[in-house]
Image (spheres, helix red, strand yellow):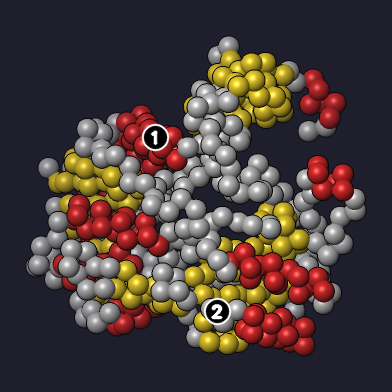
Amino acid sequence: MSRNKLRELPVLESVTIADAGAEGMAVARVDGLVVFVPFVVPGDVVDIQLYKKKKNYAEGRAVRFHSFSPLRVDAVCPHFGVCGGCKWQTMSYEAQLDAKQRQVRDNLERLGGVDCSGMRPICGSNNIFYYRNKLEFTFSNRAWRTKEQMADGEPDPWGALGFHIPQLFDKVLSIEHCALQPEPSNAIRLAVAEYARNHALETYDIRNHTGFLRNLVLRCSSTGEWMVIVIVAQDDRERLFPLLDMLKEMFPKITSLQYIVNTKMNDSYSDLEVVTYSGADHIEERMEGFRGGRELRYIVNPKSFYQTNSQQAQRLYSFVAEFAELQADDILYDLYTGTGTIALFLADKCKKVVGIEYVEEAVADARVNATLNGFKNAAFYAGDMARVLTPEFIAENGRPDVVVTDPPRAGMHEKVVAQLLMTAPRKIVYVSCNPATQARDLQLLAEKYDVRRIQPVDMFPHTQHVENVAELVLR
């Protein structure tokens, strides 16, 4: 929006922020107009400069604070308000949990007509900083500069290594310190940036598709292992290998050092070869079993999906196991099984577990993890869920007594819901990262199922995201 157009929109004065809203925004209500504002806290009293206005809603930014909310706390991250990744960081953690609990209840009741009398208090995260086991950083020749940086002088001609600015595909904010992943995450990133700058390794130009350095991926595990993946645009080993040697020598904690050559027009690497330069081609994650079950080992390779908050994953899966109430002779289906983490967490509590997943590489990982843990009662199948889960498939693998489903944000395909209704297992445990689509699916399943217990889990402190576990019992 042009500056002249922005001047035409009003400034709303002395507005009290009413609540936390969608996408990490906060909500104010002025004369029937709902206004979405980032980086403010319910209870703040602010002046709001509007930059978008529709009939029933508007978007704006706080340009003046008259008073601060009692729910407000100091931000830990030096990039808060610019990076955009942790929009609730200035809201007390107790207030964050309360907002997420209400978000789940509102979605289930309003969109799904779900009886939420069985909802438990949300399970908060013991660690609210440095809890992530995976971060992906981007190199760019177009560094985003704050007002303070612009006042200090000319931009760094090398570019930036950090996070994308929201809604700007080519602008990257250089990150000095991120409070999401434990050390040596920050030290590794800063060392890579310093080396690249000193050795004239060009950052990537996403508009013209030129340059050398594209992405840096850091993964760690609860066992203390670290994986570093450097992604470059050209197979230029004379420039790449000395960078990798520096990392190998400087950071002995790196147990898996790998690289990818990506010559494509986008940053996805699921279809690209990963080359192991030093150490193993994976790291290992471990998780305690449920109620006396065996300790589980999971192989995590560069393309594996694993819950990014390892400690909370243990608690999330424990709620799933509790709700499943498996018996020794049960057949369990785990839909959208990924690398089989939930399926194997439950495998020693039932006769047989069958996992289905769309991504073939994930199914291969699940089979490796089953072998690694000595499970002979786990079978994994790859394919589109709506096409795999058929009456013929069920006849071949056995009718499930219990089904666990953990679909992507879009929820379950209507054919999958229909098949579950037809198969009618005695219990369904539905894990969701999107309470809105979960509510839609629960409404469809209400034809035969009642929701007994509901357990929200906070996997991502300082963001609006929330996981939810629902127990459905056949009537």
Q: Position of residue 96 (x, y in %)?
A: 45, 38
- Is 79 in front, or is 361? 79
Say left or right for 377 vs 228: left
Residue 189 visible? The answer is yes
Residue located beneath label 2 in the image: 254
Task: Point out residue 80 in the picture as x, y percentages from the top left corner.
Answer: 63, 45
**Left-right relation of 274 to 290:** right
* Residue 112 vertical position relative to residue 237 in the rendered view, above or below: above
Mark 1 lies on residue: 98
Image position, residue 261 (x, y; %): 67, 78
Kind of residue sitting beneath label 1:
Asp
For this rendering, which residue is in front, 268 or 138?
Answer: 138
Whether residue 52 is visible: no
Residue at 22% of width from left, 32% of height from top?
A: 117
Locate residue 353: give its quadrant: bottom left
Depicted 146 relative to depicted 392: above or below: above
Q: Quadrant of the C terminus?
A: top left
Task: Give the mark nearest the N terminus, 1 or 2.
Answer: 1
Task: Kindly report the distance in space between the C-alpha atoms of the residues bearing marks 1 and 2.
Answer: 38 Å
319 and 359: which one is in front? Answer: 319
Query: Which residue shows up at 60% across the image and 22% down it?
Result: 67
Give the quadrant of residue 15. top right
Image height of 15 relative to 231, above or below: above
Tag 2 secondary structure: strand
Q: Residue furthest right?
A: 154
Tell me the SS state at disc 1: helix
Q: How many marks do you count on the picture?
A: 2
Q: Residue at x 25, y 53 (%)?
A: 319
Q: For the point 75% across and 53% down, which residue is it? A: 171
Q: Quadrant of the N terminus?
A: top right
Judged left or right of residue 370, residue 464 is right
